[in-house]
Image (cartoon, helix red, strand yellow):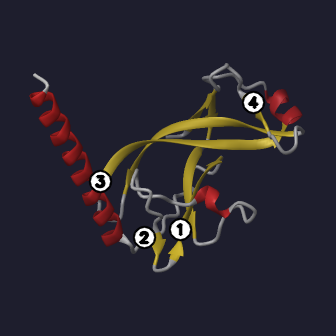
Amino acid sequence: MSKAIVTADKTGNVIGVSQNNPEYGYIRVEQETTQINDQGWLRKVKRGALIKGKVQDLIDCAYKAGDEITGKIVVRESLTPFNPNNPDRDLKVAGNTGVICRLDDQPIYRQTFFTNDLEAGDQFIMHTNTDEIRDVQSAQRALVSMTLNNKSANETINM
């Protein structure tokens, strides 16, 4: 877990340029790691992060897709937005439910960062709206089941 891999976009570009200021840009790195949650469940995850800088500095580094960079990608969660100008950008959402994870009434923000500090760890905040998330998941499962049942019934009728 000590290497991150430089990636390229769909057109093969390693360096992305900021839309707001073309003097600045980023490269994207990915890393596979194992994560153990507070309930003791282990799972393998693929993480991605941006390494930001001046475009010329990024060019000078001459990174290519597939290059390995020593370091790791960590997750940081916060009750304060990482980007005050666009606070919704980094909201932590529970899977594909659309439910924003919260600690009591405060939304949780989540972002990944690349660091050279191999001792750095993740900083998670445990959400407290588990019942809301489970209710939405249950409703989604029921909707999928109803959709499948209707589709199956329609296929039987059309035979």
Q: How many marks?
A: 4
* Circle 4 SS class: strand
Q: Which residue is mark 2?
A: 127
- Left or right for 52, reference 37: right
Going from N to C along the chain, the mark reached first, 3 or 4, is: 4
Q: Residue at x 44, y 57 (%)?
A: 98
Residue 108: assigned label: 1
Q: Residue at x 83, y 28 (%)?
A: 59
Q: Quadrant of residue 149?
A: top left
| Disc 2 + disc 3, Cβ < 8 Å | no
Q: Amino acid at mark 4?
A: Ile
Q: Residue at x 10, y 22 (%)?
A: 159
Query: How far across and down, in percent of the image, does residue 60 sit?
Result: 85, 28
Find the distance from the CA under tag 4 to the CA under tag 1.
Answer: 30 Å
Q: Which one is nearer the viewer's eye here, 102 or 44?
A: 102
| Disc 2 + disc 1, Cβ < 8 Å | yes
Query: How far across and down, in percent of the image, does residue 3 sit?
Result: 56, 36
Find the distance from the CA under tag 3 to the CA under tag 4.
Answer: 39 Å
- Left or right for 23, reference 140: right
From what the image shows, is residue 78 above or below residue 150? below
Q: Which one is nearer the viewer's eye here, 101 or 98?
A: 98
- Left or right for 88, reference 92: right
* Circle 2 SS class: loop
Query: How far across and down, in percent of the image, does residue 72 sit?
Result: 57, 45
Q: Which residue is mark 4?
A: 15
Going from N to C along the chain, the mark reached first, 2 or 3, is: 2
Going from N to C along the chain, the mark reached first, 2 or 4, is: 4
